[in-house]
Amino acid sequence: MPKVSHEYREARRDEIARAAVRCLERNGVRDTSIADIVVESGLSIGAIYSHFTNKAELARYIVGRFLIPRIDELEAAGSRGDALTPREILSEMLRVFSDGGLPAPLVVQFWAEAMVDAELHAEMTRTAGRLGASLTTAVTPWVRERAGDAASAPLIAQQSAQTARTIASLAQGYIANKAVFGPRDVAEYVDSVADAFGA
Amino acid sequence: MPKVSHEYREARRDEIARAAVRCLERNGVRDTSIADIVVESGLSIGAIYSHFTNKAELARYIVGRFLIPRIDELEAAGSRGDALTPREILSEMLRVFSDGGLPAPLVVQFWAEAMVDAELHAEMTRTAGRLGASLTTAVTPWVRERAGDAASAPLIAQQSAQTARTIASLAQGYIANKAVFGPRDVAEYVDSVADAFGA
DNA sequence: ACCTGAACACCGTTCAAGT
DNA sequence: ACCTGAACACCGTTCAAGT
């Protein structure tokens, strides 16, 4: 396969995906039709269907294309930092998700789509698995420090995974709450969690 | 308006709503059509449209009908209890949302619908407002106790509202996480939050 | 007043035909 | 190979007509 052709194809897919995201931000998942994306992109129905087998695959591409770089940022932040606390990891994660990321209502709509589209659910589980691994890695030093020398490696691994899932939950809680009730300062949220659930 | 007629009408709406919920639990919001509800209920298209102006109003009715009793339960629990901690309030709230309530994936799908349907969003904001008020009431004694005698009433009210929003966020986080990644024990989640964010 | 179901506008997707 | 757009099956909703 010639390289130029591959690059052209990727560029075309990106062009379509970016047009789709503009529609999604304007009207939400439910109210953007293929016809809207046709108009926004200036292409034709057939052109879109020659690059994506269906609307769900386009959604999957968008999730991968726009979310994975953010996960990479988080992973980088996690691996360069040393013994970050869950609070710091959550703050970092929400920073990644809030400024310039996909808008919160759109993230919630993707969750909902994933409940219904098995392929999208698989794609999300895959990306979320990477995210979970990053979070687990990032939180392990903190867990080890608190557990003391007596703790076995499997115990630390299990506790790290559990804490990572909790951090992911709190991030999801922030996003869902923001989507339904409007914006909230990240620092205020994290402080409030610590304040209400501390000790 | 004669009472029997009103009761008949309410019963009919309930019959339709229950048939709809059976479809929703089986196939999700996106994959249940009016035609499905027609089959499930044994009625006709027109019968449904003579009781609900459209699909969104049916969704709104379902939210009100099935969620409000749960909120009332929570309110009752909050007002009979004295100085519950945020942990206890969150546990109580999740208990209400988990056993026998609407399944988590369905709740997420309703959030997504609300992003797109203004009327449903208004209905959700209204029910969520009541929930927020209940949570605020429930958490106020705890906030007051911690603040000490020096704290002014407006400060306590503001902090109670803030804590209530945080509890709601954590509940949403639990629901979203459960919907995407599968079930998790409520007590384990709450303990893990306290453990990771304590002190 | 409640209900019926054919009809309508619109949706995602396909596919024969063009370049 | 990429693209076109008419055609198709299906969706939510309407409405003239029945009881």
Image (cartoon, coloured by chain):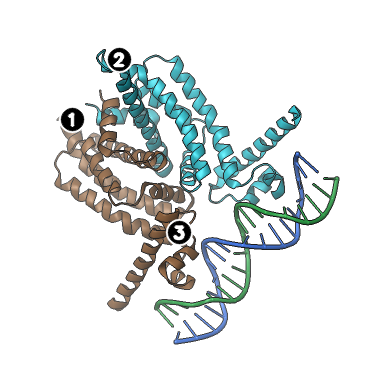
Chain colours: A cyan, B brown, C green, D blue
Badge 2 crowding class, 10 Å Cα cut-off, few under 14, some 14 to 19, many 20 or more, is few
Kindly identify the amino acid type of the residue bearing the numbered disc 1. Answer: Arg
Disc sitting over residue A145 in the figure:
2
Identify the residue shown where x is 45% and y is 31%.
A129
Secondary structure found at label 1: helix
Residue on which disc 3 sits = B56
Secondary structure found at label 2: helix
Disc 3 to disc 1, how far (Cα)?
Answer: 44 Å
Secondary structure found at label 3: helix
Decide which of C14, B64 is in the foreground and name it.
Answer: C14
In the image, B99: left or right of A89? left
Residue on which disc 1 sits = B146
Kindly identify the amino acid type of the residue bearing the numbered disc 3. Answer: Ala
Residue D7 is situated, as x and y percent measured from the top left of the image, at 72, 62
Closer to the observer: label 2 or label 1? 2
Residue B29 is situated, as x and y percent measured from the top left of the image, at 45, 54
